[in-house]
Amino acid sequence: MRRTDRLRIAARYTFAFGSGHLATFLSTLSMLGLVLAISLLIVVLSVMNGFDKEMRQRILGMVPHITVQAAAPIRDWHTVAARLRSHPQVVDVAPFTGFDALFMHGKRIETARGIGLDGAAELTSRRLLRALSAAQVEAFSGDPDGLVLGVGIADKLGVTPGQQVTLIVPGSGPGAASRGTRWHRVRLSAVLDTGTELDQSTALLHLPLASRLAGLDTAVSGLQVVTRDLFAVSRIGWELMNNLPAGYYTTNWMMTHGNLYSAIQLSRRLVAVLLLSIIAVAAFNVVSSLVLVVFDKRGDIAILRTLGASPADIAWVFIAQGAMIGLVGVALGAALGALGARAVPTVVAGLERVLGMHFLNTDVYPVSFLPVDLLARDVLLVAGAAFAMCVLAAIYPARRAAALAPALVLNEDR
């Protein structure tokens, strides 16, 4: 039997233009199962990829990779910064001052962690302020008493750019050595809206003002380090600490956001395994469908054998049918999954507007929107795995069909 004849027979058993209605119906069911499983897997993987991308580029792109601090405020921070910059993996070093404060506007009060930035450290400033427009950055840079608040804090305070906010920094230290509570009026220069959890805790000021409010005078709380390798911060931190005098210690983003990042990675793997099992179930459906087709087409198989078709020819017909089912199911499923992944953010945003609620909130989740990152390698991997499963699933029915005895089948049909 020629190869074209095998494909023609397999196509008659698979698609609607054939005369075998039961075979076509069973093939269609198998295709639909593949389409649903593949499209669902691509959509879910794209969403998990989106969370991973936003975590790496948006959140980790704004927080310091490594933070160097000491038991006491750092006064000669220029010398320490020079030592840190000598490390080949260090891209930028910037001083900062952190303090806990109350932010008051009218009768509303919110707590936040104030961070003082050094305007001379352009790379670090750009990382933190890149969500602002050029005009907003200029307004903040030109005002020594300027303040940038996360949108979550600004909304709770009911304050808008141009209005004044009172900072209340509680005193520290026991007894007479304690510093009194400090009050200062600042002007809100801009509202930071990154769509991440940083919107609920960010309060940026200029470094001299922050150091003065924290009671450090010209000293700083520590130094923020940006590295070349985001995932080697533990090793780099140890190397930096060994190059500094005693009393210094380092922290890194893995200590603050590592659990969240690991949870996203673990969830992605578990979801992939779970949904691949759904594709395996759809492939098993191909086995049952083709077995029923073999039973339904026993007479046709017997006639083909009497006309000279070999058992291998019959087996290849059903393997080709499994491949056709897999090819159509994979193509439609991949296309539907890609379209669905592209449409998910729009659909979710529309549902939020209609229902008047937010499914994701930065009080709980790392981002306030549903991110999607459709990767070609995921589509190809899912499509290839599904197609291979369908071809493998067709082997057992093909062997059953090849093992049928023509004489016995024709004798039963008499």
Image (cartoon, grey):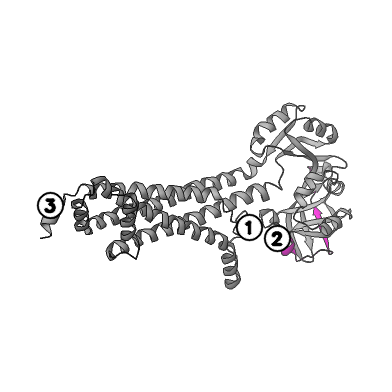
Residue 338 drawn at (x, y percent): 53, 58
Q: Is residue 165 magenta?
A: yes
372 to the left or right of 280: right
Quarter of the picture containing the C terminus is bottom left
Q: Are marks 2 and 1 in contact (CB under 8 Å)?
A: yes
CA distance for labels 2 and 1:
9 Å
Q: Is residue 132 above or below residue 126?
A: below
Residue occupying image coordinates x 37% and y 50% = 390
Q: Amino acid at mark 1?
A: Asp
Residue annotated with mark 3? 408
Residue occupying image coordinates x 56% and y 66% = 347
Kindly tell me whether residue 100 is visible in this rendering: no
Residue annotated with mark 2? 152
Q: Is residue 243 above or below residue 72?
A: above
Q: Quadrant of residue 80?
A: top right
Q: Secondary structure at mark 3?
A: helix
Q: Nearer the viewer, residue 54 or 400?
A: 400
Residue 303 drawn at (x, y percent): 19, 55
Residue 398 drawn at (x, y percent): 27, 49
- Magenta segment, which residues? 151-173
Q: Quadrant of residue 412?
A: bottom left
Structural crowding at the residue carrying mark 1, measured as other residues with C-alpha within 10 Å and reported as few (<14), some (14–19) or many (≥20): some
Which comes sooner in the sequence, label 3 or label 2?
2
CA distance for labels 3 and 2:
78 Å
Q: Is residue 274 above or below residue 67?
A: below
Residue annotated with mark 1? 363
Q: Secondary structure at mark 1?
A: loop
Q: Amino acid at mark 2?
A: Gly
CA distance for labels 1 and 3:
72 Å
Q: Quadrant of residue 85?
A: top right
Q: Nearer the viewer, residue 197 or 308?
A: 308
